[in-house]
Image: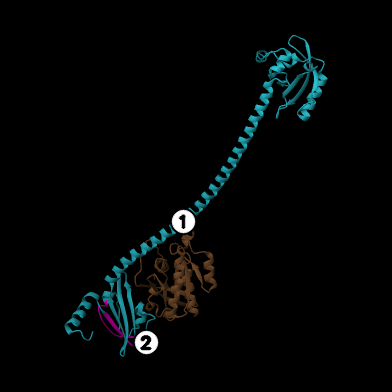
Chain colours: A cyan, B brown
Amino acid sequence: MSDLPAPVRDFILELTEDMRSPAYMLVGENNLLTAWGGDWGAHDVTGLDERMDVSEHITFLHGLLPLETPNVFLPNVQTHEGLYADVYLFERKEGTWVLLLDATADASARQRMQQKSNVLRLQVAEIEREEEALYEEQGILEAKVRERTKDLAETNMRLKKELIERQRIEKELRESEARFRRLFESNMIGIMFWDLKGAITAANDAFLDTLGYTQDDLRLGRVHWDQITRPGKLNLDEKAFVEMRETGACTPFVREFIRQDGKPVTLLFGAALLEGSQTKVVCFTLDLNRYK
Amino acid sequence: MMAERNIVQKKVCMLGTFAVGKTSLVQRFVQSIYSDKYHTTVGVKIDKKVLDVGNGWKMMMMLWDIEGAEQAHDLRKSYLRGAAGYLLVADGTRRDSLYLALEIQARAEEAVGEVPRVFLINKADLADEWEVEEREVEALAQKGWQVIKTSAKTGAGVEEAFTALARKMMES
C-alpha cells in the first residue's frame, strides 16, 4: 500500500467507508473497551461504554481475547439477522484493535450460490442412492432370471428326454401292435377279445370260421360267450379265471365250444387278462381236429 | 446479583459437513422451533442460551453455528479460537457425513486441542432411511465418543446433547 499515491489511498478509504460501514474498537487489558468509532449501528452493535468488558458484551469476541496470534480474521460473522461483517482483530502496542467491515452483500451472494450448490449435491447424492438401490434390485432380478432360466432349461431337457422316451415307447407299441395284427390277421390260430361279462368285442376269421360265424355276425352282436360255450364245464373255466387273476394268464386247456349250427367243437383254449384290466381278456383257440 | 456471580460463559462450536442439521439443532435448542426448509449457513451465526448446570451454576452457552465444511480443510480454524467444546454433527441418512465429521474433528483438534465434545447423529426421525449402521455408532462409542442420536425435527435427544456437553465442560 505504501507505494500507492495519496489520491488512490484516499479513494480506497472513501470506497471502504461508503460500501462497508467500517466500525472499530480498541481493547485494552482485561478486555476493557478503551476507544471506539465508526458505524457500529450498521452492525447492530449498541450500548458500547468505556471500560466495559467487550468479551461479555459482544458475543463473537468471547474467547478470542486476548489474542494468541498477531491477528485473526473471521469472515462473514452474522451480527444480526441478515447482517454480516468481516471481523478483523490485530494486536498493536496500544492494545487489540477490532475492525468490522460490512460483508452482507458478499455473504448474501455467497449464501445463494452455496444454497444452490448444496441442494444440487443433496439431489446428486439422492440420485446416486437411488441408482445404487436400482443396481441392487437389478442384480436380484438378474439372479432370479438366471435361476428361472436354469429351471426352464432343466425342464426343457427333461421334457426332451420324456419326449424321446415316449417316442421310443410309441414305436415299440406300434411294432408290437403290428406284430400282433400280423398274427391276428394271419388266422393261423383263432384269436378273440372278450370281457368276463361274456361280450366278445373282436375276433379274427380263424376263430369265427371254427364256430361258423362271420365278422357281420360279430358286428351285429350275434356272437356271445354264453352261446359258444357249453354249460357243465364251468369248473375248468373257474380254475382258468382264478389262475388268470393270480398270474395274468391261464394255462391252455382243451374245452368244448358250440358252433352256430349247434355242433360241438373241441378247441385248445388259452387266455390272458389285458394289461391293466381285471375283466378284459384276449384268448386264442386252436382247432385240434385239424391236426389229427 | 448472586446469579450473575454463578454464571459461566462458554463458547461452543457446531461442526459437521453441510445439511446435517447444525442450524436446525441450534434453533430447536435455543428457540424450540423447527423448519423443514433447508437454508445454507454461510460464515458463522452466533446464538446464546443459558443452561442450568447444577450446584447453583448456570452456563451462558455461546453457540457458534459454523458453515458446513464440504471437506475438512474448508473448516476455518479462526472460528474455533476460544471454543470450550464442540458438537460434531452427522446426518444418519448420509454415511459419508459421519466419516467427514471425523475428518473435520481432527482439524478442529489441531485448532483447539482436546476439549469436551459430543458426537450427534441427527435426523433420528428418518430412522428407516439411515445409512449409518448401529455397528458404526458402537464403533464410535468404543473410541470414547459420547454419541447421541438426535432429531431437530422432533426434538428427540437435543436437550440431552447440549446438556451433556455443558456438563463435560463444567467438569473439564
Q: Quadrant of residue A263?
A: top right
**Spot occupied by residue A151 in the image (x, y as percentages of width and height):** 56, 46
Residue tagged by mark 1?
A135
In this rendered view, identify the residue nearer to me: A20 or A55: A20
**Spot occupied by residue B71 in the image (x, y as percentages of width and height):** 40, 71
Is residue B91 among the parts visible in the rendering?
A: no
Q: Quadrant of the C terminus of chain A?
A: top right
Question: Is there CB contact under 8 Å for labels 2 and 1?
Answer: no
Whichever of callouts 2 and 1 sits on the residue coming sooner in the sequence is: 2
- Please tell me how many numbered marks the rendered image carries: 2
Name the subunit of mark 2.
Answer: A
Q: What residue type is labelled 1?
A: Tyr
Is A27 inside the magenta-drawn segment?
A: yes
In this rendered view, identify the residue nearer to me: A258 or A50: A258
**Spot occupied by residue B166 in the image (x, y as percentages of width and height):** 47, 75
Residue tagged by mark 2?
A30
Question: Marks 2 and 1, Cα distance to the nearest angstrom?
Answer: 63 Å
In this rendered view, identify the residue nearer to me: B45 or A51: B45
Q: Quadrant of residue A64?
A: bottom left
Circle 1 sits in a helix, a strand or a loop, which is it? Answer: helix
Q: Give the range drawn in magenta.
A: A23-40
The local crowd at label 2, few if under 14, some if 14 to 19, many if 20 or more residues have their Cα within 10 Å, is few
Magenta span: chief secondary structure: strand
Is A278 inside the magenta-drawn segment?
A: no
Q: Quadrant of the N terminus of chain A?
A: bottom left
